[in-house]
Amino acid sequence: MTVTDSGSRTTALVTGAAGFIGSHLVEYLLAAGWRVRGLDDFSSGTVENLRGPLLSRDFAFTEGSVLDERLVRSAAAGATHVFHLAGRVGALYVEQHPERTIREVVQATRTMLAVVDEIRAPLFFASTSEIYGDSGVQPLAEEADIIIAPPTNPRSSYAFGKGTGELLVNDYARRTGAPVVIGRLFNTIGVRQSGRYGSVVPRFVGWAQRDRPIVVYGDGRQTRSFTFVGDAVRAIAAGLTTSSAYGHTINIGSDQETSIGDLARLVIRLTGSSSTVRHESYDRVHGRGTRDIARRVPDTTRLRQLVGCRCATPLATAIGTIIESPSRVVAGESD
Ligand SMILES: NC(=O)c1ccc[n+]([C@@H]2O[C@H](COP(=O)([O-])OP(=O)(O)OC[C@H]3O[C@@H](n4cnc5c(N)ncnc54)[C@H](O)[C@@H]3O)[C@@H](O)[C@H]2O)c1
């Protein structure tokens, strides 16, 4: 059993609990002895993702939206910690719904802040490495200036939305002195991630498993830092239970850098697939004048020094868990 400093049992509210990262976080907290309440509207998450937790007496689930303040208040009653992960993700969704992307992040953040203020619980806010845009200065440090694509590009609504969410959380913490942690997650991967909205690893694995061509945008030399979900949820939980992390924005990511071309070749090798790699221009898929981000590597000093965590699971091991999972990988919209 996990207890707070005052001796009461720790109880988490996890929003976005039925999603990819949320469901792993729920499992991690339950295994660590927490009581957990999950909230999700199933807009992209699924009840299957919660199959294990729903068998636990320590897990309770509420179906509904984080935009509904009354519902959030009732789901949060008695929570000692709040992990706010709910939100719409994926380049394909964001490009189609820029106004909704920004409005929902802002509205949900305001609701979560009102509720944690009432119950006096520490808040984890899930932000994103997309915030950094196409910064030329790598590795990406939390206090560095950021370069977001112009508002003419609908994809930038995700970074503007999460950035506004971060501003609201920081303002709340400054005004009230309340404990908050903002985690900027870098390309998190693992079992249960869907490729439906454009996430690259489930798409590549799903295509390779079906021996379909693997589509790489541009020359494939753009890099990302893929982070195993098991490492990410350990860092999220440690962040919100470590007082030295309170008030900070912290990169949650691996510092292993991999090009998308190498990722495609690694997936083909690990799956034993006969897929070939096909290159397509980025702006043909995402709209004229848009370009892919060239590099994205986190500075992990804060994660190591303030939280005492590293995201160090090798990429091949993380991809291996997806390949070996009995659940079918959703590679795209047509699956
Ligand atoms: N996966 C990544 O690589 C990554 C990277 C950076 C940031 N993040 C952030 O981490 C969080 C979780 O992402 P994920 O990859 O698990 O995505 P996901 O889509 O699998 O999970 C998000 C969950 O939130 C739920 N949701 C969406 N809107 C909701 C609402 N209004 N009310 C209640 N539930 C709602 C969805 O149904 C889903 O279950 C998101 O906030 C995302 O922005 C993820």
Image (spheres, rainbow, N blue to C red):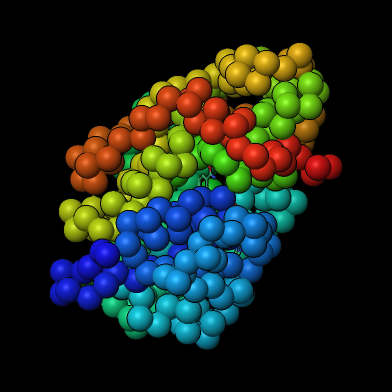
Near-viewer residue (133 or 24): 24
Asked if residue 151 is positioned above or below residue 73 in the image, the reply reads above
Q: Quadrant of the N terminus?
A: bottom left
Give left or right: position of 280 versus 147: right
Residue for point 76% across, 16% down: 275
Residue for point 43% across, 25% down: 314
Q: Choose top left, top right, bottom left or bottom right for residue 252.
A: top left
Give left or right: position of 122 versus 147: left
Asked if residue 29 is positioned above or below residue 154 in the image, the reply reads below
Residue 224 position in % (x across, y down): 51, 27
Near-viewer residue (215 or 128): 215
Q: Is residue 63 visible?
A: yes
Q: Is residue 153 visible?
A: no
Near-viewer residue (278 or 212): 212
Asked if residue 286 is positioned above or below residue 223 in the image, the reply reads below
Number of labels in the image equals 0
The image quadrant in which ligand 1 is located: bottom right
Residue 302 position in % (x across, y down): 25, 40
Asked if residue 264 is positioned above or below residue 53 in the image, the reply reads above
Give left or right: position of 299 versus 264: left
Residue 308 position in % (x across, y down): 22, 42
Q: Quadrant of the C terminus?
A: top right
Residue for point 35% across, 47% down: 234
Residue 188 position in % (x across, y down): 50, 40
Q: Choose top left, top right, bottom left or bottom right for residue 99.
A: bottom right
Near-viewer residue (321 or 68): 321
- Residue furthest toward the left? 6
Residue for point 42% across, 78% down: 76
